[in-house]
Amino acid sequence: MRASDKAYESLRTDIIEWRIAPGTVLAEVEQSERLGVSRTPVREALGRLVADGLAVQQRGRGTVVSEVSDDHVEDLFVLRVALECASAKEAASSTHRENFAELAERFDAAAHEVMSPGSREAYYQLTQLLDDSIDEAANNKYLSNALRTLRVNLQRVRRMAKDNPRRLKESAREHAAIARAIASGNPEVASAATTVHLHQSLTHIMAHSAGSERQ
Amino acid sequence: MRASDKAYESLRTDIIEWRIAPGTVLAEVEQSERLGVSRTPVREALGRLVADGLAVQQRGRGTVVSEVSDDHVEDLFVLRVALECASAKEAASSTHRENFAELAERFDAAAHEVMSPGSREAYYQLTQLLDDSIDEAANNKYLSNALRTLRVNLQRVRRMAKDNPRRLKESAREHAAIARAIASGNPEVASAATTVHLHQSLTHIMAHSAGSERQ
DNA sequence: TTCGCAGTTTGTGTATACATTGCTCTTGCC
DNA sequence: GGCAAGAGCAATGTATACACAAACTGCGAA
């Protein structure tokens, strides 16, 4: 593994997991010493973080970790709705929709079982499997690329919302609806189901964000 | 101006203007000699080109200029429809819509005058002014960022289509419809008008691409 | 003649030294 | 006492040297 990849992965994870707070200045020499690599790979890593939108370059001060506020979350979800609806539409129009019926059943099952901490992790993997399946069925590298960048930012926001069992069951039902719409080859319904799910998800996040203010 | 910015601008322009053909290998030493800077800024420039999707990194061979085919154009327009419709919706929902009525009138005027080469350039500036106005009214940095990356790729594709006066007049009428919908604060119509315009635009590009094959 | 191995060469990955820019602190003048 | 200008310092920007990996070519053997 290249040193620049190592530095990028390390910094990205630290930012997403909130181990590095927004507003923190990422000095090149400091990070190179901390990560045990020279400045060159660190520079490349910082450049990729800026491209991802996780950091911004300020003249003279270096690169600082970008801020996350409620406004940003709403903006992020506007983009998310646009991209995921388009992706769901494309997937529902494609010919590779074999496994979406099974995915719908698995989400139905998840909606009926109790959510223990262990099964919660399994549920997150299931949602990622659906995302990946939609991505693959949509078969559009530009769309995939935009979604990949978006999801990096989403992971950081997700930490603002505490998922409770009740919300997870709702989420499972919404995901099942999306998978079923794609399986039946109905782009409009797939898009609508995605819109509903993301609206509920945003509402949930904003409610918890308003309740606990800033983390 | 930094040497890395200079290298990036130079390479990006060359790729967009088709002075560097798809498939060309961008060797670091070769480009550093050509551009008169050292390898370090060139490396950074190449990284940004990869992030833009204008080049891809291949293990062992270095970075090569990415290919552009009809399939890619269709994929690009799927993303474009999603992003520009979302942007138009947001703009139509915003409160900063003062200058869209005037923009609509200017597009109406453009649709009625003859398109000389000089006024064609002015027309392109007018379309960019509309894009920028929508961007500003939408006021969403994530959306703006995704659109910025998209438009870099679009500029390269635009070279595949020869705009004729007839198409430009149609385009002007379609743009006027978008501007009017935003001015009247109607998100649904703004989105629909954008969809119509982009569909016509893609149809025009594909017709010319199929007629003249590859450039 | 073809296949395989080894050597050379070219190119990327990393480290470090040097240049330059911007910021801050201090000192002097108003 | 406050403001401005200059000097010093620290951090980024750039260049170059070195290391390593991969690909290509040439030679030899089957």
Image (cartoon, coloured by chain):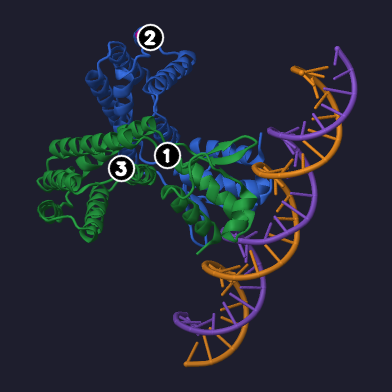
Chain colours: A green, B blue, C purple, D orange
In which chain is the residue bearing label 3?
A
Part of the protein shown in magenta: B98-102
Share a chain, discs 2 and 3? no
Q: Is residue B200 visible?
A: yes
Residue B215 disc label: 1
Report the mark closest to the observer, 2 or 1: 2
Badge 2 amino acid: Glu
Contact flag, marks 1 and 3 (Cβ < 8 Å): no
Q: Is residue B41 magenta?
A: no
Q: Chain of mark 1?
A: B
Would residue B100 be counted in the magenta stretch? Answer: yes
| Residue C26: x %, y % from top left | 82, 33
Callout 1 secondary element: loop
Measured in 3D between alpha carbons, the distance from the residue under mark 1 to the one under mark 3, in whole angstroms, is 51 Å
Q: CA distance from mark 2 to mark 1?
A: 42 Å
Q: Residue at x 43, y 16 (%)?
A: B126
Q: Residues within 10 Å of mark 3 (few under 14, many from 20)?
A: some
Tell me if C20 is positioned left or right of A73 in this view: right
Q: Secondary structure at mark 2?
A: loop
- Image coordinates for residue A122, horizontal then vertical, percent: 23, 59
Q: Is residue A103 left or right of residue A127?
A: left
Q: State the separation of the CA atoms marked 2 and 3.
A: 37 Å
Instruction: Say which residue label 3 marks.
Output: A161
